[in-house]
């Protein structure tokens, strides 16, 4: 029995097992639309595994400016072609589809450090030169307003919605918004295992049993240095304000949650914000 045949049989079985969900969602498209390094691949893979009959897309940029910047930054020609095909596929059906868009947020410090790891991996930096001092310099020079700009200039613009105009539901730990072409679900990576299923059930009547763990092999050679970085960080009041006291961090996380994040990342010899 070929792998392709087994895959088709598994898909057919899941359609039968989830037939009511299939009927509810057959005219709906799902889009995992996030900034990088927030666990979006895990959610995308989980949706495709549990509901293989869904029309699910995964993208980081859809606006003209966002896509242009992404293509300019991408060094791999095969990856450039993949991004172009993904963007074209979504844009071709955007105006005539009903969408459930899912985006994720994450502890700003954790996201930024992970982004640094991704960047040095893409840039093919010699692992021998990636020590704590090098990472501290990259961290100090990092644009910690990127996540806020991604929401304002990418997601809000594409969806014709200002997420920041509506308070985040800290009790449920996720929020659902309406936009002209459907619903937007905002999840937090820290709560994903507990909130993905309730949020999807509320919007689309779906239950997600698990979220898979994304592959981090691209950063494997830098993980030790990234892990040790928190032991040497100096989070001055100015740097704390830059990372944790902006519209993005304050909208999605409570003051107590942000203080706890800071304590987690600044340990041992590091300094916390006063």
Image (spheres, helix red, strand yellow):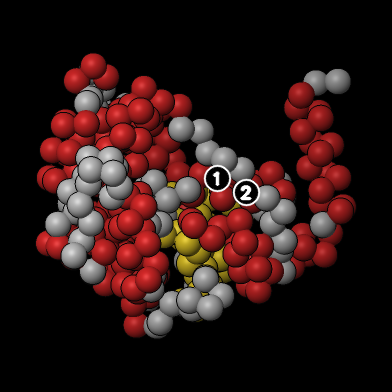
Question: In the figure, residue 194 lies in which quadrant?
Answer: bottom right
Q: Is residue 193 visible?
A: yes
Mark 1 = which residue? 42
In the image, 220 versus 201, the foreground residue is 220
In the image, 165 versus 27, the foreground residue is 165
In the image, 63 versus 208, the foreground residue is 208
Crowd rating for badge 2 (residues with CA inside 10 Å; few <14, some 14–19, many 20+): many
Question: In the figure, residue 116 lies in which quadrant?
Answer: top left
Residue drawn at x 17%, y 38% is: 136
Per the image, label 1 sits on a secondary structure element best described as helix
Indicate which disc residue 53 carries: none
Image location of residue 46, percent across then percent down: 63, 47
Mark 2 = which residue? 211
Q: Is residue 32 left or right of residue 2?
A: left
Tag 1 and tag 2, C-beta contact below 8 Å: yes
Image location of residue 24, percent across then percent down: 74, 67
Crowd rating for badge 1 (residues with CA inside 10 Å; few <14, some 14–19, many 20+): some
């Amino acid at each position: 029995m070929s792998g392709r045949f087994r895959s088709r049989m598994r898909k057919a079985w899941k359609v039968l097992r989830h037939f009511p969900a299939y009927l509810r969602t057959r005219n709906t498209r799902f889009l995992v639309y996030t900034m990088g390094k927030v666990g979006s691949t895990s959610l995308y893979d989980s949706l495709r595994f549990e509901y293989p009959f869904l029309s699910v897309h995964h993208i980081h940029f859809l606006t003209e400016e966002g896509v242009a910047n992404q293509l300019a930054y991408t060094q791999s020609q095969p990856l450039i072609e993949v991004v172009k095909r993904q963007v074209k596929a979504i844009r071709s059906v955007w105006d005539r589809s009903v969408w459930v868009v899912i985006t994720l947020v994450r502890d700003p410090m954790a996201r930024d450090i992970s982004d640094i790891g991704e960047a040095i991996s893409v840039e093919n930096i010699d692992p021998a030169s990636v020590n704590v001092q090098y990472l501290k310099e990259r961290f100090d020079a990092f644009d910690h307003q990127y996540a806020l700009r991604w929401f304002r200039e990418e997601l809000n613009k594409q969806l014709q919605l200002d997420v920041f105009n509506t308070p985040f539901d800290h009790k449920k730990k996720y929020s659902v918004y309406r936009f002209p072409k459907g619903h937007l679900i905002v999840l937090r990576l820290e709560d994903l295992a507990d909130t993905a299923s309730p949020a999807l059930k509320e919007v689309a009547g779906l239950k997600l049993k698990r979220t898979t763990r994304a592959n981090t092999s691209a950063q494997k050679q830098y993980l030790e240095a990234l892990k040790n970085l928190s032991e040497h960080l100096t989070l001055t009041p100015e740097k704390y304000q830059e990372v944790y006291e902006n519209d993005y961090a304050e909208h999605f996380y409570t003051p107590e949650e942000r203080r706890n994040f800071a304590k987690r990342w600044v340990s041992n010899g590091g300094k916390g914000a006063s």
